[in-house]
Image: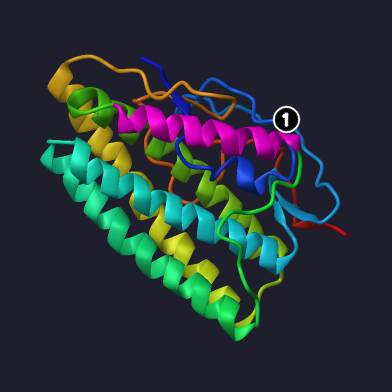
Amino acid sequence: MKRTLHGVTLAAVLFTGGVSLAQSAAPSPTSPTTPKPVTAMKGTVEFKGFIVPSDPKAFLERLHYINQSEIKQAKLAQQNSQNPDVQSYAKMMIDSHTTADQKVMDYAKSQNLKLAEMPKPSNDMEKKAMAADKADMEKLQAMTGAPFDSSYMSAQVGAHDAAIGKVMAAQQGMNATGELATLLTHLTQELPKHRDMAYQTLGKLDDAMGVGGAGMQGGTMNHGSMNPSTPPSGTTPSGSMGGSTGGTTGGPTKTK
């Protein structure tokens, strides 16, 4: 049973550099979907279809915004959910993203970079996505109990699929060294844990309800469809991830 994943976080759009986020059917474990090629735009780097800003400040601002968004959503989950598994997941998100965000801010300070709380949209796609993100957050704020749990957790799976791919793109395409390389390594270790826990928690919700539920459907942000039978993807980008995914390439592409 397919579960539609739409944005609560901006992980997909904030790293695409303007590439359209098309909703797509999830590949089965035995027959992966071949993603369409994408081209890195000016000021971005691309790796296996995932695109991120090549400017460190722009990249860090998006990481900071996503961390803060995840913390806010998790705090909302602690208020609006009565499910112990969702509560546990939310606590983990608060702790982990607080730590990650401190690393982002510490690195930015060491580079004399002042990060904006809200990234400046690089294009109309990103501007619309940020508006949709706000609308989706308002929808979540109006939910409680099981409807909140289903919407929040389904969006978390798709959002982390997207985030994993984007961080991998940065790791492979930005030629990061020193503290930035350490930060990216930390994220590639932590984000799959978030995704796996979200997937497992979502499965428990489905088991409790006996049926699959629908996730958030707001604005223009699409994370793609996630088949509940599809296992966690770990750190390997695939067509099921949020955002536009391209064909597999031999190495990173940087466009100045």
Colouring method of the image = rainbow
Residue at x-position 47% and y-position 63%: 187
Q: Residues within 10 Å of mark 1 (few under 14, many from 20)?
A: few
Q: 168 above or below 124? A: below
Where residue 144 appears, as percent x and y from the top left, is 21, 28
Q: Is residue 160 left or right of residue 119?
A: left
Residue 138 in view (yes/no): yes
The x and y percentages for residue 27 are 51, 25
The quadrant in which residue 237 appears is: top right
Residue 239 visible in the displayed image: no
Q: In which image quadrant can residue 228 be found?
A: top left
Query: Could you tell me which secondary element the residue under label 1 belongs to?
Result: loop
Between 90 and 2, the residue placed more toward the observer is: 90
The answer to whether residue 252 is left or right of residue 10 is right
The residue closer to the viewer here, 119 or 40, is: 119
Q: Quadrant of the N terminus?
A: top left
Residue 194 is a magenta residue? no
Please give the range of residues in magenta.
124-142
Residue at screen point 65% across, 82% down: 112
Magenta stretch containing residue 128, yes or no?
A: yes
Q: Which residue is mark 1?
A: 36
Residue 218 at x, y percent in the picture: 49, 23
Q: Quadrant of residue 142?
A: top left
* Quarter of the figure with the C terminus: bottom right
Q: Residue at the location (35% across, 45% down)? A: 73
Label 1 amino acid? Lys
- Whether residue 239 is situated above or below residue 121 in the rendered picture: above
Q: Residue at x 34, y 31 (%)?
A: 140
